[in-house]
Image: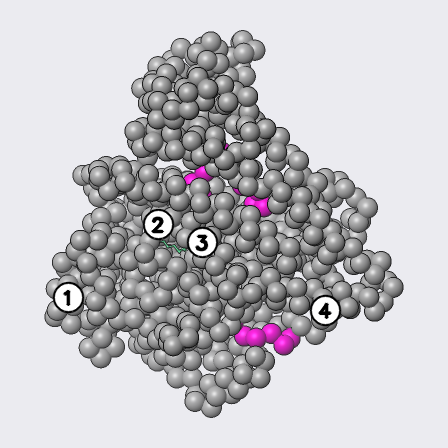
Amino acid sequence: MKRIVLFIASFVLLFGSSVKADEGMWLPIFVERLNYTDMQKMGLQLTAEEIYSINNSSLKDAIVGLSTSGEPGGYFCTGGIVSDKGLLFTNHHCGYDIIQKHSSIEHDYLADGFWAMSLEEELPNERLTATFFLRMEDVTDSIIPFLSDTMSASQRSAKIREISNRLKKNADPDKKYYVNVTSFFGGNEYYIFVYEVFRDVRLVGAPPSSIGKYGGDTDNWMWPRHTGDFSIFRVYTAPDGTPADYAKENVPLVPKHHLPVSIAGVEKGDFAMIWGYPGNTDRYMSSYGVDFQVNYFGPNIVRLLGEQLVIWKEDMSADREVGIKYASKYASNANGWKYYLGEQRGLKRLNVKQQKEELESRFMQWVAEDAERQEKYGGVLEGLKSGYEQISSKFGPFILGVLGANSPEILGFAQSFGTLAGYLENKDKTGAIEETAAELREVAREHFKNYNTPTDQKVFARMMEIYAGEMPADMQPQGFKDMVAKYKGDFKFMAKDVFAKSFLSSEAKVNAFLNKPSHKVISKDPAIILSNELMGSMIVLAGSYRAANAEISKNNRLFIAGLREMMPDKAFYPDANSTMRLTYGSVQDYKGADAVYYDYKTRLSGVMEKEDPTNEEFIVPERLKELYAKKNYGRYGAGNKLIVNFLTTNDITGGNSGSPVINGRGELIGLAFDGNWEAMSGNIAYEPALQRTICVDSRYMLFIIDKYAGAQNLINEMTITPRRIKVPKEKILQIQKAAAATN
Ligand code: ARG
């Protein structure tokens, strides 16, 4: 699953054992202590040292976090190293934005795929980085004793920042690495992480979208699936092996470890582990949080994103050039839209709120048993309740405001001009105006590359109409109301006029302005005025949440601490937070609903069954049809079948997309790429009977690379292993029994 990043320009949405195997995203350093025996029982054949070691190469050295923010932490996806020349597998949907950027009508790599047949043909990517995790250490005792519950939220975070900065300096005196101090369990524990970040990562291969995105948004988040969701990159280093910016003389990375690729196939019950960088979960969320998610957050986001998507799609379908320009942002928002839709549905159907309430009443009983506990935890649930109540009451307008001010891309873009406007107003003489103008030229180039003015004008008209109609009148800024009055409520006319008069509606106009930046022009630009009005009122509203957010996060921290005290024998795993995790489980089918049974694997024949030449999401490429007709699967076939996707019980979330799925011998059997519709509430509660990870089979990837694309160069550099490991029958029975007992 890809990390959900909605295409919203400038304003970040707020909020941003007796363990059952399968559930849990574990920190690799604790695996030996918490999970190793369990994993062995399930079919793991590696030593703990081969799993995680700081001194010797181990599995962790073949896992990378992919980022475009230039820093680790914001990984959008995971990759796995599959050759001794730094070759890296991730999902097609992870590479999608990059493939899109290299695409044009002349080189339509989105539609046709891309294969580098030699190193020279590999395509460099600005800002894309691959991060390797080197080591981590518990620093809780250097931080927690210096904090207290009487500190305000801002005092607390200032203290944490101060200590973290010192720890970071000590951990990396030569500034060779990237060091992060990250909080766990809602701020009850802290760990320091040392990473090495490689900055030259090149595109090597991608199947056409008709394979890599087969089934499109219709099949997204659903099983059965038939998608070849993989793309290939390569990490490069300076000639001496150190990280470097892109340079012609850079050489392929020699990794500490690479994953052999298995073509032995998977069977029900086989052990499977998944390594990667899950972004965010809220497994310890209270019933009040669930209520907020179901009734306020989800419905508002889904509704407003849906409006934008409909308009985008219409223009994308009418014109391939617009189709290419909007492909990646459309895919992102459509993915988020469907995710939140599924999450709401899942939370309701699976009675997650009720599950949480049951836990909370046990918690309150436990608290009531002891005076000290009452003192410490007595107010926790009340605090959570009140925090969420404060946010909920205004959340609808808030999200309406944020999306209203950002869905029309012109308004988000307008926010980039605030700094320049400030310099112009103050008649700056230090050269800052010229400097900022030069930067803005770059920003504009990026913005217009994937932008279509008429499309955005339509979005603008629709969003302003919704905003005017649904935002409570007393929360609409006066400037906006005046504008609506001026156009007599004709939003199409308003859009037409704003786009005609604003210099932000074309790159030529922006550049003409930047050649002669003037305060008069910028302060009169209708898009800039409107954007400032709308964003201004949202910033005020967001400010009013600050206290409520602090209350939630404080009580959430105490709630988690209390739960851990209450269940001292349970192995707790921390929520996902973009640090490296390992999850283990097995290949499994499931019952989706009454009378609905789902097999755990899909075949190429299923791709053909879904074929629909009239629907762009289900077009099967000619070449694939030929290969299917000939059943020419070579060593990648299972008999005369070719397995495309399979399911496991692993516990993953956004950020895990592209994560290697690894068998008991440490070999790659597939890549994780999605979750299933029946368990979309998974970020908040893991559902053992329903929750599955959807994986693309390594044999399908190799088949596409080898037989479809003819990229023997890539096949030759991988370590392909045909061995099959059988998990003994009695082992499987044992596991099933154990699972049944814990259910
Ligand atoms: N649901 C997948 C994830 O979050 C993304 C799939 C992308 N495909 C699509 N049709 N939008 O990782």
The residue where tag 2 is placed is 95
On screen, residue 217 versus residue 196, left or right, reads left
Residue range in magenta is: 5-22
Q: Is mark 3 within 8 Å of ligand 1?
A: no
Residue at x-position 53% and y-position 39%: 399
Q: Position of residue 308 (x, y in %)?
A: 38, 39
Q: Please, is residue 108 above or below residue 372 in the view? A: above
On screen, residue 509 versus residue 13, left or right, reads left
Q: Inspect the image, locate mark 3, and give the three-letter code of the amino acid beneath it.
A: Leu
Q: Earlier in the sequence, mark 4 or mark 2?
A: 2
Q: Earlier in the sequence, mark 3 or mark 1?
A: 3
4 and 2 marks in contact (CB < 8 Å): no
Q: Position of residue 23 (x, y in %)?
A: 54, 69
Element at label 1: helix
Q: Quadrant of residue 186?
A: bottom right
Element at label 2: helix
Mark 1 or 4: in front is 4
Q: Inspect the image, locate mark 4, and give the three-letter code of the amino acid beneath it.
A: Arg
Q: Please, is residue 2 above or below residue 543 in the view? A: below
Extreme residue toward the bottom, this view:
730
The residue where tag 3 is placed is 341
Instruction: State how far apart marks 3 and 2 are (Cα).
Output: 24 Å
3 and 1 marks in contact (CB < 8 Å): no
Q: Inspect the image, locate mark 1, and give the three-letter code of the amino acid beneath it.
A: Leu
Q: Earlier in the sequence, mark 1 or mark 4?
A: 4
On screen, residue 732 versus residue 718, left or right, reads right
Q: What number is the disc on residue 627?
A: 1
User: Is residue 7 covered in magenta?
Assistant: yes
Q: Inspect the image, locate mark 2, and give the three-letter code of the amino acid beneath it.
A: Gly
Residue count near mark 2 (Cα–Cα under 10 Å), binned few <14, some 14–19, many ≥20: many
Q: What number is the disc on residue 362?
A: 4
Name the foreground residue: 301 vs 271: 301
